[in-house]
Image (tube, rainbow, N blue to C red):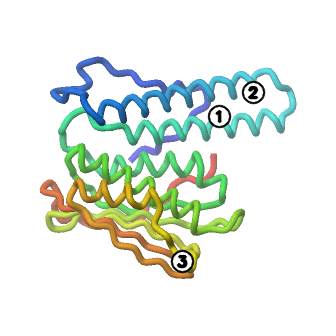
């Protein structure tokens, strides 16, 4: 699969016509989530333009390199939001491709700056657009939780995302080699993830130790069939 590589100077706005919604009518909470995502992408695009403008008027090479790095990370952050847009139809999607786009964007935008390496291991996984979207939301939150809580500042580490197609089910796991706190108090993010998992009939299992943590998501999936295990896909950690 092709990597999503942030490119300085690329626009990150959304190009959709009314027909992009297919047979689905935007309504209720779905419409507001779509608007918030659209607004966030636009805001990041404005910030990206400001950074690129600053880069074009400074002369110090070190400043230019720093601003270019920020520009590329902002582009990757916008790509991550773009990957988490609500689906506009009920088609069957390739979950493995969606996860690759998402993980590459998170690696570029946030993790590589903290010396956290991210690896994706995924089977080819067909899933409904709604199920795929909600799984991606959960995986993104689990990755960022690991990056935030499992590693000390400037210590680096690794996070592995595994996704496999089992008999009529999807299994996803996010594992890190950091260190979990002695006492873990579920916060607002954990409650949101549990609710999203419940919407698609899924269950989340946690295993936290001082040598690393693993969180497993199991989701029933009528589209899923057992697939040949994939080779690990290392995500780029250098811009």
Question: Gap between marks 3 and 1, in whole Å?
Answer: 38 Å
How many discs mark residues in the rendered view? 3
Q: What x and y, as percent, mark residue 31?
A: 31, 30
Q: Does residue 185 appear left or right of residue 48 in this picture?
A: left
- Marks 2 and 3 sit apart, C-alpha to C-alpha, by 45 Å
Tell me which numbered mark, 2 or 3, is placed earlier along the sequence. Answer: 2
Q: Which residue is mark 3?
A: 183
Q: Residue at x 42, y 64 (%)?
A: 232
Residue 230 visible in the picture: no
Picture layout, residue 129 above or below residue 120? above
- Please tell me in which quadrant of the rendered image residue 150 appears: bottom right
- Looking at the rendered image, the quarter that the C terminus falls into is top right
Instruction: Tell me, yes or no, whether the two marked residues, 1 and 2, touch with CB atoms within 8 Å.
Output: yes
The residue under the point 24% across, 50% down is 131
- Residue 106 visible in rendering: yes
- Quadrant assignment, res 222: bottom left
Task: Label 3, secondary structure: give it.
Answer: loop
Horizontal arrangement in the rendering, residue 167 relative to residue 170 (left or right): left
């Amino acid at each position: 699969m092709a990597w999503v590589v942030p490119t300085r100077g690329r626009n990150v706005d959304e190009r959709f016509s009314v027909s992009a919604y297919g047979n689905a009518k935007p309504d209720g909470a779905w419409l507001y989530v779509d608007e918030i995502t659209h607004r966030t992408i636009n805001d990041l695009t404005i910030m990206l333009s400001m950074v690129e403008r600053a880069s074009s008027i400074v002369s110090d090479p070190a400043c230019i390199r720093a601003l270019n790095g920020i520009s590329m990370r902002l582009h990757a952050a916008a790509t991550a939001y773009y990957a988490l847009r609500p689906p506009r139809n009920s088609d069957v999607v390739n979950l493995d491709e969606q996860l690759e786009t998402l993980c590459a964007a998170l690696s570029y935008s946030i993790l590589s700056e903290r010396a956290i390496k991210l690896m994706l291991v995924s089977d080819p996984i067909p899933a409904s657009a709604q199920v795929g979207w909600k799984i991606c939301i959960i995986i993104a939150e689990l990755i960022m939780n690991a990056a935030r809580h499992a590693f000390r500042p400037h210590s680096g580490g690794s996070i592995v995302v595994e996704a496999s197609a089992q008999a009529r089910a999807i299994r996803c796991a996010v594992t890190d080699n950091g260190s979990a706190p002695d006492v873990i108090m579920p916060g607002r993010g954990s409650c949101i993830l549990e609710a999203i998992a419940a919407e698609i009939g899924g269950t989340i299992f946690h295993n936290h130790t001082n040598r690393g943590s693993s969180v497993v998501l199991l989701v029933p999936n009528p589209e899923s069939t057992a697939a040949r295990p994939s080779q690990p896909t290392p995500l780029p950690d250098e811009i």
